[in-house]
Amino acid sequence: MTIVRLILGDQLNSQHSWFKEKNEEVIYLMAEMRPEATYVTHHLQKLIGFFAAMRNFSEHLEQEGHRVHYLRINDPENPHTLKEVIHKCITQYQAEQFEYQLPDEYRLDKELREICKTLNISSATADTEHFLTTRDTLKNFFKGKKQLLMEHFYRMMRKEHNILIDANGKPVGGAWNYDKSNRKKWKGDPEIPELPHFSRNTVTVLKDIDEAELSSIGEADPDNFQWPLNRSEARELLDHFCEYLLPNFGDYQDAMHTETVYLFHSRLSFALNTKILHPREVIDQVVHTYEKDPDRIDISQVEGFVRQILGWREYMRGIYWMEMPGYNDQNFFKNKNKLPGFYWTGNTRMNCLSNCIKNSLDHAYAHHIQRLMVTGNFALLNQTDPDMVDEWYLGIYIDAIEWVEITNTRGMSQYADGGLLATKPYISSANYINKMSDYCKGCTYDHKKRTGSDACPFNALYWNFLHDKRAQLESNRRMGIMYRLLDKIEPEELDAIKKRSQAIMSDPDEF
């Protein structure tokens, strides 16, 4: 029986059970499709990364003896719609069954179910065998509970998967969470080791993208593309992280600095989100590295990393499947302002935003605090429409796939779900940015001032936001201190704060 099996661009898992046996009657279908490359304006490195990784994966399958039907972006036989791609392949090979791995995006999940109804052959699904939870794990865990606290979910995951748990069922080191140890400001020491270098280019992929006239943002050097595009490169990056970066990861995971892009972060998110690497193998190697040398690596460094993968990543996926399709319509604050134009250029006098955005445009990357407390923080204080914020985050970062992007952006960053995911809005004045970075040191604006032409825009916007959103936030217990401080601001200063905020929000590109 001839079977066509679809592999999506974020399903590049060579360890999947599909590939354990070679079968001449199985055709693996992969396609670079224009709608997937254009539904938002993607970073050029994101387009290159996905196309190149998909091509590498198809070549790997063929080298392993599997049959692959691959359609490139400019292939004249490529119809560029998922339905037509599937129907044509089934017809060409006279297949008797169609199979696909469950997608991680709601729209594709719905589309594939609808496509299967149009087929005159049988169809079947398989799990991606990637996550440590099912789509329903989080929903079932929190059933009947009032709050969806990630910490509770994270502790359950630690116990269930026996990760950093001692013989007595207690957390290794005596604490579940070392977040308070993960907030050091990096000042140039310890030195950050050089990243491994991948000796290959992506010139052909870039030429194909140019020929297809695909719109994009950002920059890329096709002769020196440094994101992992196959399992060997991803494993090399994981080895490098464990050996050289893990000993300082936790301490500086929230730090930001003008002289470095990655600090001690692993850069594994693209490999994880395309399923080149499995989260369990990443966690296991990190934990094993710690257990081999606990005198060199403190538990706080390891727990901070495990929490991101085992806790936060799985938690976000659970929220996505629990709340879609309505989650992408959430707008708790009814924010409607436009995203400032400098998000596409980095051209602003605010040093923190300029640095984070230009690095994002250059590298298709920013770590979680830069996304949350700089670009996301300003977007929320600017009262930006979360639809526009979603579109920007989904396009600019190489690791951005809707299931993980929209929950982090609309939920964590923009509080558009009204507190389903986060217990309070993640907003701050310039004080936090100054505490965790050197951005304020070289800035045009004074991070200590609230008003005046040289006052940091974050400060006026912060207090203005609290004032404007008082009805929605005043009853939040975690916001009580800030509202008491707001009430201590003299009426004259509050009026000046509001006037400056209106000037900023009316034309943020002037700042």
Image (cartoon, rainbow, N blue to C red):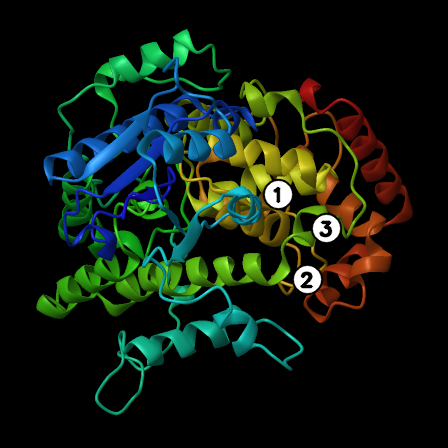
* Residue linked to disc 3: 330
Q: Earlier in the sequence, mark 1 or mark 3?
A: 3
Q: To which quarter of the image does residue 300 belong?
A: bottom left
Estimate the spatial distance between the alpha carbons at disc 1 and disc 3, rounded to whole Å: 18 Å
Are there few (<14), some (14-19), or many (20+) residues within 10 Å of tag 3? some
Q: Determine whether the residue tagged by mark 2 lies in a helix, strand or loop.
A: loop
Q: Is residue 229 visible?
A: no
The quarter of the image holding the C terminus is top right
In the image shown, does 110 or 168 lie closer to the viewer? Answer: 110
- At label 1, the amino acid type is Asn
Q: Is residue 131 visible?
A: yes
- At label 2, the amino acid type is Gly
* Residue linked to disc 1: 377
Q: Is residue 187 left or right of residue 453?
A: left
Estimate the spatial distance between the alpha carbons at disc 2 and disc 1, rounded to whole Å: 16 Å
Looking at the image, is mark 2 or mark 3 nearer the viewer?
Answer: 3
Q: Earlier in the sequence, mark 2 or mark 3?
A: 3
